[in-house]
Image (cartoon, rainbow, N blue to C red):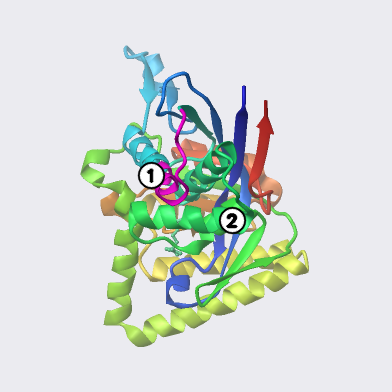
Amino acid sequence: MKKVRASVPAKVILFGEHFVVYGTRALATAIDRRLTVDVTARAKSGYHVTIENIPTFGLELDLEARKGADQTIQPYKDYGSAAQALSYVTGAIEYLEERYGIGDEGVHVAITSGIPLSAGLGSSAATCVATVAALTEYFGVRNDLERIRSDAHAVELRVQGAASPIDTAIATHGGYVLVEQGAVQHVQLPELRLLVGCMGSISLSMDTAKAGDLSLKTKALIAGVRARKEQFPAFFEAVCNAAEELTTEAIQALEADDAVKLGTLLNSNHGLLDAIGVVPRRLSSLVKSAQSLGALGAKVTGAGGSDELGGIGSVLVLPGRHEEQIRAAMELEGALVMPVRTGGEGLKVETSG
Ligand code: PMV
């Protein structure tokens, strides 16, 4: 039986998020958390899709509650975001049917992901790239990396209205990308070991109903930043210039393998993100815990968050020698913490049968 497996990496933005919207340089990298799409034949016609998002569904036990009367093991779940993830799969199928006429025989599409949803780690782009790659390969459509990337970007645009080119570029090509004036450039830089802490996507305590539609979180945060930019243009220009300087210095620090300098720059970038209002209390607290425990650097990554939107989002930490203590402290604060390596491999496609 023919089987195609496509797998792609998640991403983190190391420097320059938000400012990149106004043309400033930003640096992002693939990390070794992957999403896999398997396409196999199905006896019936049509598509059958499953999604298993390991960081988002599972069981949790409150150890404090265990001492008392309530010892129930609870399911944790983020079905809203999973339903959103499925919309990228259906979007990709519709797009490929229209563009290449695929789908004359039935297939199973099985997605298995180690990338938390709604966390700014590129899970939407990963879903689009891996689905486009696996389905075009299965149905014998002529493809190459550049066409897969641009088709996946078109799907992402169709589903969510606006999307930066960073995520699909990294999911496809892996490694590091530098974005300047909207153009994506691949750069060779050494590997880093980081901790990524995601707040909220699995917490039972978060009232997602109150937090509203989390799929619109990035859009809402970008709009908030724009409003502050318009209110204080001179201030904003100064912060953008500072962000540009940090990204440039960071590339030099990475090239020189200077982790101490890189950490200082991460801390400064976090300060700039706080200055433009995208650091909610829960993410601020994670960053401060990591810094106070001796991290070389720590910052919010991606769109950030707001207290009104439940304070969910992600941080990244350059832990230095104190990785275990920092990880434990962040977990105590309720974060899902993942040790990751940067610069990983892009799209991989395997065919058998
Ligand atoms: O949280 P994410 O991964 O969607 O990051 C958004 C990053 C922004 O700079 C705020 C927007 C963008 O498209 O680059």
Residue 282 falls left or right of residue 301: left
Which residue is most to the left? Answer: 210
The image quadrant where one finds the N terminus is: top right
Image height of 62 relative to 325, above or below: above
The residue carrying mark 1 is 94
Q: Nearer the viewer, residue 29 or 328?
A: 29
Evaluate whether residue 250 shows in this view: yes
Label 2: state its secondary structure: helix
Residue 228, magenta (yes or no):
no
Query: How many residues crowd around disc 1 within 10 Å: few (fewer than 14), some, or many (20 or more)?
Result: some
Which residue is most to the right? Answer: 256
Q: Which residues are magenta?
A: 91-105
Query: Residue 170: which disc?
Result: 2
State the image coordinates of residue 84 (x, y, percent, origin top left): 35, 41
What amino acid is labelled 2 in the image? Answer: Ile
Q: Main secondary structure of the magenta part?
A: helix
State the image coordinates of residue 99 (x, y, percent, origin top left): 44, 51
Image height of 262 relative to 47, above or below: below
Query: How many residues crowd around disc 2 within 10 Å: few (fewer than 14), some, or many (20 or more)?
Result: many
Residue 146 falls left or right of residue 201: right
What amino acid is labelled 1 in the image? Answer: Glu
State the image coordinates of residue 112 (x, y, percent, origin top left): 52, 31
Q: How many marks?
A: 2
Query: Residue 122: which disc?
Result: none
Label 1: state its secondary structure: helix
The image quadrant where one finds the C terminus is: top right
Q: Nearer the viewer, residue 40 or 296?
A: 40
Between the residue at mark 1 and the residue at mark 2, the CA separation in whole angstroms equals 23 Å
